[in-house]
Image: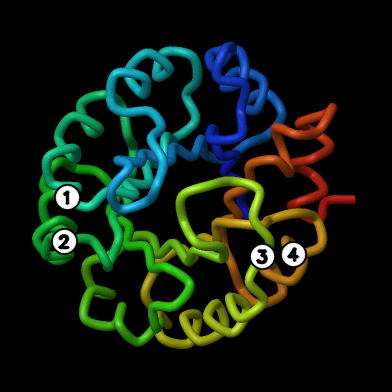
Amino acid sequence: MVQIAPSLLSADFGYLAKEVQSVSKAGADYIHWDVMDGVFVPNLTFGAPVIKALRPHTDIPFDVHLMVAKPMRLIDDCAKAGADQITVHLECEENPADLISHIKSLNKKAGLSIRPKTKVADLIPYLPMLDWILLMSVEPGFGGQAFIPETLKKIVELKELIKPKKIKIAVDGGINPITAEACRLAGADVLIAGTAVFGQKSYAKAIKALKGDK
């Protein structure tokens, strides 16, 4: 069954500890952190100090997505703060292979993300190093955007490329019960959802709906 990673970008920032605990009890598989620097994307969010502060409030893995131009300077701090896996962007200013190797040296799972306009084929040189690939189904930087349908073809293409490697395919952006079903059918392993979870009255029902669990 597909796994769900609620994105804290859509949570109530005034009650983050409570929000983390609530989605944990509701059946979330990961907690997704969008770390932004205002350079790689036009927005600023949280960093390692907030990750550290929230780490004691759940045992669920922390999935940290570094939407930053120069992620190397943040990797160590995020790892020490409690990240279980760290994802960097193929399009960042630093060498992705060096970044992935450094994440792995810290005994963390390593992921690589691509923007909607980046080709799946560009990931091929890095596949042997990766635990996780994050396909952005919206332009990164802000929540609440509409799902880009071409992402479904990318999921299918990537699924063929990674066989038989044990790499999880995650999709982030515009996820709701309808797009979640399409992503599941295409072969996605993890769905990252913001308002589709935190914007609902019942987090448990929302997560079940995204998983297709009737």
**Mark with earlier residue (2, 4):** 2
Check disc 4: other Cα within 10 Å, few if <14, some if 14-19, many if 20+.
some
Tags 4 and 3 touching, CB below 8 Å = yes
Q: Is residue 35 left or right of residue 39?
A: right
Q: Position of residue 17 (x, y in %)?
A: 53, 13
Marks 1 & 3, CB-CB < 8 Å contact: no
Q: Position of residue 195 (x, y in %)?
A: 70, 40
Q: Nearer the viewer's eye, disc 4 or disc 1?
A: 1
Assign a secondary structure to mark 1: loop
Vertical comparison of 121 with 88: above or below: below
Evaluate if marks 2 and 3 touch, with contact meaning CB atoms under 8 Å apart.
Answer: no
Q: Amino acid at mark 1?
A: Lys
| Residue corresponding to mark 1 | 70
Identify which residue is drawn at 37% across, 46% down: 65
Q: Is residue 14 above or below residue 111?
A: above
Quarter of the image for the N terminus: give it. Answer: bottom right
Mark 1 and mark 3 lie on one chain; the one further toward the N terminus is: 1
Of tags 4 and 3, the one toward the viewer is 3
Give the residue number, with chain letter if any, for mark 2.
93
Residue bearing mark 3: 147
